[in-house]
Image: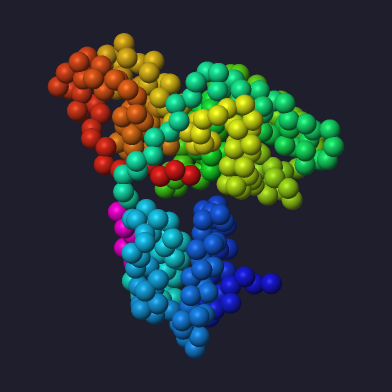
Amino acid sequence: MNKFRSFLAPLIQEYISYQQATDHWNVSSYEPNLLLFDRYCLREYPGADCLSQEMADCWCRKRDTEENNSCRSRIYAIVSFIRYLKKRGKTDIAPSVLPRIEKRTYLPHAFTETELQNFFAACDSLSGEYTPDQRARKITIPVFFRLLYSSGIRTTEARLLRLEDVDLSNGVLNIRYSKGYHQHFIVLHDTMLDLMKKYDMASREMYPTRTYFFRARSDKRHTRSWVQKNFRELWDANNTSYATAYALRHHYAIENINRWTDYGMEFHSKFLYLSKSMGHSVIESTKYYYSLVPGLADIMTKKTSKSFDIIVPEVTEYEEID
């Protein structure tokens, strides 16, 4: 049964098919908001047969209860949908302007060695003796979260990894879909590559053919809620502090940066490599992590003097969390 019931339903389905075909479909974010927009059109404009500027503007207008970032999250899929229609001559209305991203006050958790040991011990202690789903979870969880920890990969990027994106011969991940759709490559550490190879062999025994490297049920990819639920359960098993899976990306960046305090001008090259590996289109995005390292800014200012502001320019926007 079609979830969408307004006059826009055929066009929304067409848009979804296009997004899925180009691997840009975000079911956990796009679908709920498109569904809400569909219900709004059905309720407020029951006799309408085409999209009007009034419909789009009323829905996309920032609400009194919203911050810029929450408004962006709510209307982004609708703006993208209207752009899709406009490019194909199926509407003449103008897409709304997205509110500017606001700087986040969120500070990622500073992991301790003991906390990380506890977490990965919990990952490794999962039972896999009963159902196929339990066996799949037992082999997937330890590798999935170690990949986040060792590479700084975004949780979304890890979930969307297709089998063809993982080059186990050379230890390279092809990140085809990322924030802003910036394709980039990640070279795996030798120990992580070994784990990925073992996981791949075990997965092939269970599923001779699969689309996604980390396969979910029915050959689909894991959802955002799957990541959150499993991290929460395993983290809380032996730790009392609050942390999120995304904080592993912050930890990766900060641990790398912390090693460079004695590198002087070589810092610039290493910072650039880190930025590209983490999939940032501009180095300013990477400086967000730099700003979280206590005291490092003072150290680098002292070592590089006037060149400091050239090497690490001011941050203008924080990267959005998956």
Q: Residue furthest left?
A: 306
Whole-percent x and y of residue 299?
A: 25, 16
Whole-percent x and y of residue 39?
A: 53, 74
User: Magenta includes 16?
Assistant: no
Whole-percent x and y of residue 50?
A: 45, 82
Between 93 and 242, the one lying in front of the other is 242
State the residue at coordinates (38%, 18%).
Answer: 258
Residue 52, quarter of the rendered image? bottom left
Between 36 and 13, the one lying in front of the other is 36
State the residue at coordinates (22%, 14%).
Answer: 303
Image quadrant for the N terminus?
bottom right
Dominant SS of magenta comes to loop
Q: Residue furthest top?
A: 262
Whether residue 248 can be seen here: yes
Residue 161, quarter of the rendered image? top right
State the residue at coordinates (60%, 32%).
Answer: 236
Q: Would you say 162 lies left or right of 127 here?
A: left
Whole-percent x and y of residue 95?
A: 35, 68
Q: State whether residue 208 is above or below residue 93.
A: above
Residue 108, quarter of the rendered image? top left
Q: State whether residue 22 is above or below residue 55.
A: above
Q: Residue furthest bottom?
A: 47
Between 267 and 235, the one lying in front of the other is 235
Its colouring scheme is rainbow
State the residue at coordinates (33%, 55%).
Answer: 68
Q: Residue furthest right?
A: 130
Which region of the structure is painted magenta? 96-100
